[in-house]
């Protein structure tokens, strides 16, 4: 299938599922009129060649549980109020586009969300503190963007987090010690940033933690004792770090 999305799709007022994924030759903008599909529960538009911006009209899709726009050529900012009414959304996939601007604070309204994939875009600015209001979030994948500032300490309140992917951004400041409160964490990747200070005690000994990568930052000090055999590559590129599995510290 090729061509563009017709704005007349917006007249299908009873539609609950829209799946136009992986058509590849589907081009052009996403019609603003799709925001009239207020009964929609699932929208799949990934793996196409769609262009332009995310329509601000999508903020009226309050019943959405699944929204996937990944792997297109979308650009511009995420509309500021896009998530304001999306309290039923469970899965959000905006990855592999050319989106820019900041993550809107309205992201904190998605009370039901489990997965947030924003990786491989050009997003900038800080992570809004409102993200800590997502009690059910399991995965945050923001890697390969231009995000900056401190990693919010309030992420330590997101008790259902399982995986955090923040690699290859421009985060600064210290690794929040509050991450050690997340007993279900299995994966943390903070590599390729400009984080400073020490690795907080406790994080490396989380019982569920299987992967931990802080390579290529500006961390310093002794790596805290840990039970698990994390390889040296997980700590490489931090000239100030020392202790197992890196070289011993000079006392």
Image (cartoon, helix red, strand yellow):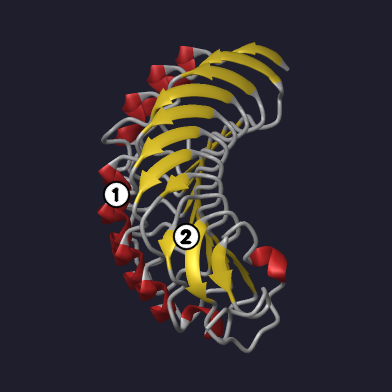
SS of the residue under disc 1: loop
Which residue is rendered at x = 26% and y = 36% of the image? 81
Q: Nearer the viewer, residue 15 or 159?
A: 159
Distance between the alpha carbons at the discs numbered 1 and 2: 17 Å
Q: Nearer the viewer, mark 1 or mark 2?
A: 1
Q: Residue placed at 44% from the left, 82% from the top?
A: 201
Q: Where does label 2 land, which residue?
A: 114
**Which residue is disc 1 drawn over?**
128
- Examine the rendering and report whether any part of residue 84 can be seen: no
SS at mark 2?
Answer: loop
Q: Nearer the viewer, residue 241 or 85?
A: 241
Q: Residue drawn at (70%, 13%), measured in percent from left and top?
A: 2
Can you give x and y, in whole percent of width and height, for residue 216 in the image? 59, 54
Residue 39 visible (yes or no) = yes
- Does 167 appear above or below 5? below
231 on left or right of 71: right
Label 1 Cα neighbours within 10 Å, binned few <14 / some 14-19 / many ≥20: some
Left or right for 106, reference 33: left
Q: Look at 58% across and 79% down and name the residue there.
A: 249
Q: Quadrant of residue 186?
A: bottom right
Q: Position of residue 248 (x, y in %)?
A: 64, 80
């Amino acid at each position: 299938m090729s061509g563009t999305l017709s704005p007349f799709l917006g007249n299908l007022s009873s539609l609950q599922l829209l799946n136009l994924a992986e058509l590849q030759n589907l081009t052009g903008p996403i019609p603003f009129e799709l925001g009239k599909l207020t009964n929609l529960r699932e929208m799949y538009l990934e793996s196409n060649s769609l262009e332009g911006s995310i329509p601000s009209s999508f903020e009226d899709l309050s019943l959405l549980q699944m929204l996937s726009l990944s792997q297109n050529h979308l650009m511009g900012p995420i509309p500021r109020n896009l998530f304001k009414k999306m309290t039923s959304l469970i899965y959000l996939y905006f990855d592999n586009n050319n989106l820019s601007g900041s993550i809107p604070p309205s992201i904190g309204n998605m009370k039901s969300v489990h997965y947030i994939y924003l990786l491989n875009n050009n997003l900038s600015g800080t992570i809004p503190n409102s993200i800590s209001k997502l009690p059910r979030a399991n995965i945050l994948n923001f890697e390969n963007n231009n995000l900056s500032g401190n990693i919010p300490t309030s992420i330590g309140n997101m008790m259902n987090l399982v995986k955090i992917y923040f690699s290859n951004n421009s985060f600064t400041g210290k690794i929040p010690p509050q991450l050690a409160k997340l007993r279900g964490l299995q994966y943390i990747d903070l590599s390729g940033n400009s984080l400073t200070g020490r690795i907080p005690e406790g994080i490396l000994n989380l019982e569920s933690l299987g992967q931990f990568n802080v390579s290529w930052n500006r961390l310093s000090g002794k790596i805290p004792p840990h039970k698990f055999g994390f390889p040296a590559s997980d700590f490489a590129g931090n000239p100030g770090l020392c202790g197992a599995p890196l070289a011993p510290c000079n006392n």
